[in-house]
């Protein structure tokens, strides 16, 4: 079935789900987390300090805020795509997880993946995005054998190990040649 004009929700206010998150400004001169545009998933986090990040260097950077996330929610700290594309800046443990019980300053472990150029981060620069999501708490239990995956044509998805089902050279062994580009 095809449609001439698909029905796509374009007004974010019609579908936004809001959750209240208490915030303490540890540095009153800095702005708190803020969404740049209606409908954005990530709220911008800013740097509480000015520094240079050398090639290959990582640094734990404060944001000047602490949060109280409701039980059943977590915050996930994601890299900013513009910083990654233009400067090679990412987050070492992306996404970083902020649990509901954490009360300390939100910090971001930045890394400069550029091999040649240092990057200057200035106090107040947007360095990451915080996505607040509802999370389930799993109840783990042991079984003697895992059942086959219902979503895979393979009998035992994952039997080939980490990364065996995707990537540029998926399915190739060291004896095989890579297909021409």
Image (cartoon, helix red, strand yellow):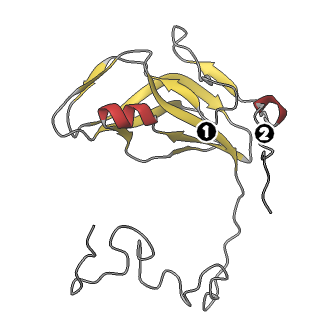
Is residue 92 or residue 11 the one in the foreground? 11
Snapshot quadrant of residue 179: bottom left
Work out which quarter of the rendered image holds the C terminus and state it: bottom left
Quick one: which residue is furthest to the front in this view?
Answer: 4
**Residue identified by numbered label 2:** 9
Residue in the picture at 60% in, 39% down: 102
Q: Position of residue 53 (x, y in %)?
A: 25, 29
Is residue 32 or residue 137 the one in the foreground? 32
7 up-or-down from 155: above or below: above
**Viewed as shown, does residue 42 lie left or right of 111?**
right
Quick one: which residue is furthest to the right in this view?
Answer: 14
**Viewed as shown, does residue 163 lie left or right of 69?**
left
Sequence-wise first label, 2 or 1: 2
Q: Which mark is residue 31?
A: none
Q: Which mark is residue 131?
A: 1
Is residue 65 or residue 128 the one in the foreground? 128
**Viewed as shown, does residue 170 lie left or right of 180?**
right
The answer to whether marks 2 and 1 mark residues whose Cβ atoms lie closer than 8 Å is: no
Question: Callout 1: few (<14), some (14-19), or many (20+) C-alpha neighbours within 10 Å?
Answer: some
Q: Which one is closest to the eye, mark 2 or mark 1?
A: 2
Residue in the picture at 70% in, 44% down: 73
**Viewed as shown, does residue 165 lie left or right of 169?**
right
Element at badge 1?
A: strand
175 up-or-down from 122: above or below: below
Q: Position of residue 42 (x, y in %)?
A: 60, 34
Is residue 15 or residue 76 the one in the foreground? 15
Q: Position of residue 84 (x, y in %)?
A: 37, 37
Quick one: which residue is furthest to the top in this view?
Answer: 29
Residue in the picture at 64% in, 36% down: 41
Q: CA distance from mark 2 to mark 1?
A: 21 Å
Element at badge 2?
A: loop
131 up-or-down from 171: above or below: above
């Amino acid at each position: 079935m095809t449609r001439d004009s698909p029905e796509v929700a374009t007004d974010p206010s019609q579908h936004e789900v809001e959750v209240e998150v208490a915030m303490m400004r540890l540095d009153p001169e800095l702005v708190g987390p803020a969404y740049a545009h209606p409908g954005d998933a990530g709220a911008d986090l800013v740097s509480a300090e000015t520094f240079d990040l050398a090639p290959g260097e990582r640094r734990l950077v404060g944001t000047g805020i602490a949060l109280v996330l409701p039980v059943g929610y977590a915050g996930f700290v994601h890299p900013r795509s513009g910083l990654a594309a233009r400067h090679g800046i990412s987050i070492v443990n992306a996404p970083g997880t902020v649990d509901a019980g954490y009360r300390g300053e939100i910090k971001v472990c930045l890394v400069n993946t550029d091999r040649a150029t240092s990057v200057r981060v200035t106090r107040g620069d947007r360095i990451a995005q915080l996505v607040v999501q509802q999370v389930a708490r799993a109840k783990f239990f042991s079984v003697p054998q895992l059942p086959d995956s219902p979503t895979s044509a393979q009998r035992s998805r994952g039997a080939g190990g980490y990364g065996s089902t995707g990537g540029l050279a998926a399915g190739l062994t060291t004896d095989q040649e890579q297909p021409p580009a």
